[in-house]
Image (cartoon, rainbow, N blue to C red):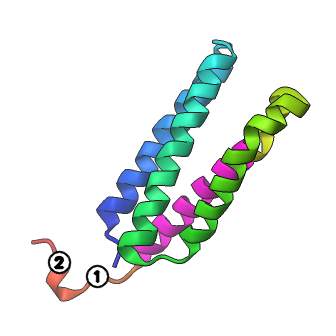
Amino acid sequence: MISERRMKFDLFGQVVLLSGWLGAAWMNLGGKWSIYLTILMGLWQFVSACHLYLSYKYARKGRFITSFLIVTLSTPLWVYLVGIWAFVPVIGLLCWYFYSTFRDTRIVMRRPVSFWNLKF
Protein backbone atom coordinates (compact mmCIF):
# COMPACT_ATOMS: atom_id res chain seq x y z
CA MET A 1 0.00 0.00 0.00
CA ILE A 2 1.36 3.39 -1.00
CA SER A 3 1.99 5.62 2.01
CA GLU A 4 0.63 9.12 2.48
CA ARG A 5 4.13 10.40 3.17
CA ARG A 6 5.43 9.12 -0.16
CA MET A 7 2.59 10.68 -2.14
CA LYS A 8 2.84 14.00 -0.28
CA PHE A 9 6.59 14.14 -0.92
CA ASP A 10 6.10 13.41 -4.61
CA LEU A 11 3.36 16.00 -4.98
CA PHE A 12 5.37 18.60 -3.03
CA GLY A 13 8.42 18.07 -5.25
CA GLN A 14 6.34 18.47 -8.38
CA VAL A 15 4.65 21.61 -7.04
CA VAL A 16 8.05 23.15 -6.26
CA LEU A 17 9.35 22.38 -9.76
CA LEU A 18 6.15 23.58 -11.42
CA SER A 19 6.16 26.83 -9.45
CA GLY A 20 9.82 27.34 -10.38
CA TRP A 21 8.95 26.80 -14.02
CA LEU A 22 6.04 29.24 -13.84
CA GLY A 23 8.23 31.75 -11.99
CA ALA A 24 10.93 31.51 -14.66
CA ALA A 25 8.31 32.03 -17.37
CA TRP A 26 6.71 34.93 -15.48
CA MET A 27 10.02 36.71 -14.87
CA ASN A 28 11.03 36.12 -18.50
CA LEU A 29 14.36 34.53 -17.59
CA GLY A 30 14.76 33.07 -21.04
CA GLY A 31 14.16 29.75 -22.69
CA LYS A 32 17.10 27.97 -21.08
CA TRP A 33 15.65 28.08 -17.56
CA SER A 34 12.29 26.84 -18.78
CA ILE A 35 13.91 23.99 -20.68
CA TYR A 36 16.11 23.03 -17.71
CA LEU A 37 13.15 23.02 -15.32
CA THR A 38 11.05 21.05 -17.82
CA ILE A 39 13.81 18.43 -18.06
CA LEU A 40 14.17 18.33 -14.27
CA MET A 41 10.40 17.91 -13.82
CA GLY A 42 10.39 15.13 -16.43
CA LEU A 43 13.20 13.31 -14.66
CA TRP A 44 11.46 13.69 -11.30
CA GLN A 45 8.23 12.28 -12.71
CA PHE A 46 9.99 9.46 -14.57
CA VAL A 47 11.84 8.32 -11.44
CA SER A 48 8.61 8.58 -9.45
CA ALA A 49 6.71 6.52 -12.02
CA CYS A 50 9.45 3.88 -12.11
CA HIS A 51 9.43 3.67 -8.31
CA LEU A 52 5.65 3.27 -8.15
CA TYR A 53 5.65 0.77 -11.00
CA LEU A 54 8.47 -1.40 -9.66
CA SER A 55 7.90 -1.13 -5.90
CA TYR A 56 4.13 -1.10 -5.70
CA LYS A 57 3.22 -2.83 -8.99
CA TYR A 58 1.12 0.21 -9.94
CA ALA A 59 0.26 -0.69 -13.53
CA ARG A 60 -1.05 2.75 -14.55
CA LYS A 61 2.42 4.20 -14.21
CA GLY A 62 3.64 1.78 -16.88
CA ARG A 63 1.64 3.78 -19.43
CA PHE A 64 3.41 6.96 -18.38
CA ILE A 65 6.82 5.29 -18.58
CA THR A 66 6.10 4.11 -22.12
CA SER A 67 4.71 7.49 -23.18
CA PHE A 68 7.63 9.32 -21.57
CA LEU A 69 10.20 7.20 -23.39
CA ILE A 70 8.46 7.65 -26.76
CA VAL A 71 8.13 11.41 -26.33
CA THR A 72 11.70 11.77 -25.03
CA LEU A 73 13.22 9.81 -27.88
CA SER A 74 11.22 11.63 -30.54
CA THR A 75 11.65 15.18 -29.17
CA PRO A 76 15.03 15.92 -30.83
CA LEU A 77 13.56 15.09 -34.25
CA TRP A 78 10.50 17.25 -33.58
CA VAL A 79 12.69 20.13 -32.35
CA TYR A 80 14.55 19.94 -35.65
CA LEU A 81 11.29 19.84 -37.66
CA VAL A 82 9.00 22.30 -35.84
CA GLY A 83 11.24 24.17 -33.40
CA ILE A 84 10.18 25.13 -29.90
CA TRP A 85 6.62 23.92 -30.53
CA ALA A 86 7.96 20.38 -30.11
CA PHE A 87 7.84 20.89 -26.35
CA VAL A 88 4.04 21.21 -26.30
CA PRO A 89 3.49 17.40 -26.15
CA VAL A 90 6.23 17.15 -23.50
CA ILE A 91 4.54 19.77 -21.33
CA GLY A 92 1.17 18.08 -21.92
CA LEU A 93 2.60 14.75 -20.74
CA LEU A 94 4.10 16.37 -17.65
CA CYS A 95 0.78 18.06 -16.85
CA TRP A 96 -1.00 14.71 -17.26
CA TYR A 97 1.34 13.07 -14.75
CA PHE A 98 1.00 16.00 -12.32
CA TYR A 99 -2.79 15.65 -12.44
CA SER A 100 -2.46 11.88 -11.98
CA THR A 101 -0.24 12.38 -8.92
CA PHE A 102 -2.66 14.94 -7.48
CA ARG A 103 -5.58 12.53 -8.01
CA ASP A 104 -3.69 9.58 -6.50
CA THR A 105 -2.64 11.68 -3.48
CA ARG A 106 -6.24 12.67 -2.89
CA ILE A 107 -7.31 9.00 -3.06
CA VAL A 108 -4.56 7.95 -0.63
CA MET A 109 -5.49 10.74 1.78
CA ARG A 110 -9.16 9.67 1.80
CA ARG A 111 -8.32 6.04 2.47
CA PRO A 112 -9.47 4.79 5.88
CA VAL A 113 -6.70 4.36 8.42
CA SER A 114 -6.17 0.95 9.96
CA PHE A 115 -5.86 0.46 13.70
CA TRP A 116 -2.14 -0.24 13.43
CA ASN A 117 -1.45 3.07 11.70
CA LEU A 118 -3.19 5.26 14.27
CA LYS A 119 -1.06 8.07 15.64
CA PHE A 120 -1.33 8.66 19.36
Image vertical order of residue 115 relative to residue 85, above or below: below
Q: Quadrant of the N terminus?
A: bottom left
Disc 1: CA contacts within 10 A as few (<14), some (14-19) or many (>=20): few
Looking at the rendering, which quadrant does residue 63 occupy?
A: bottom right
Q: Position of residue 54 (x, y in %)?
A: 40, 70
Residue at coordinates 56% horizontally, 44% vertically from top-left? Answer: 42
Whether residue 95 appears in this view of the structure is no
71 on left or right of 110: right
Give the number of the disc on residue 118.
2
Q: CA distance from mark 1 to mark 2?
A: 7 Å
Q: Is residue 96 magenta?
A: yes
The residue range painted magenta reads 90-110
Residue 110 placed where, x, y %? Answer: 43, 75
- Considering depth in this image, is 58 or 106 the residue closer to the camera? 58
Residue 52 falls in image quadrant: bottom left
Q: Quadrant of the C terminus?
A: bottom left
Q: Can residue 98 be seen at all in this image of the molecule? A: yes
In this rendering, would 111 be left or right of 3? right
SS type, badge 1: loop
- The reply to whether dot 1 and dot 2 touch (C-beta < 8 Å) is yes
- In the rendered structure, the answer to whether residue 59 lies left or right of residue 22 reads left
Query: 13 left or right of 35?
Result: left
| Residue at mark 1 | 113
Horizontal and vertical percent position of residue 117: 18, 78
What residue occupies the far right of the structure in this picture? 82
Indicate yes or no whether the magenta region holds residue 33.
Answer: no
| Residue drawn at the location 63% of the way across and 12% of the way down | 29
Q: Residue at image x 69%, y 18%?
A: 31
Quarter of the view holding residue 37: top right
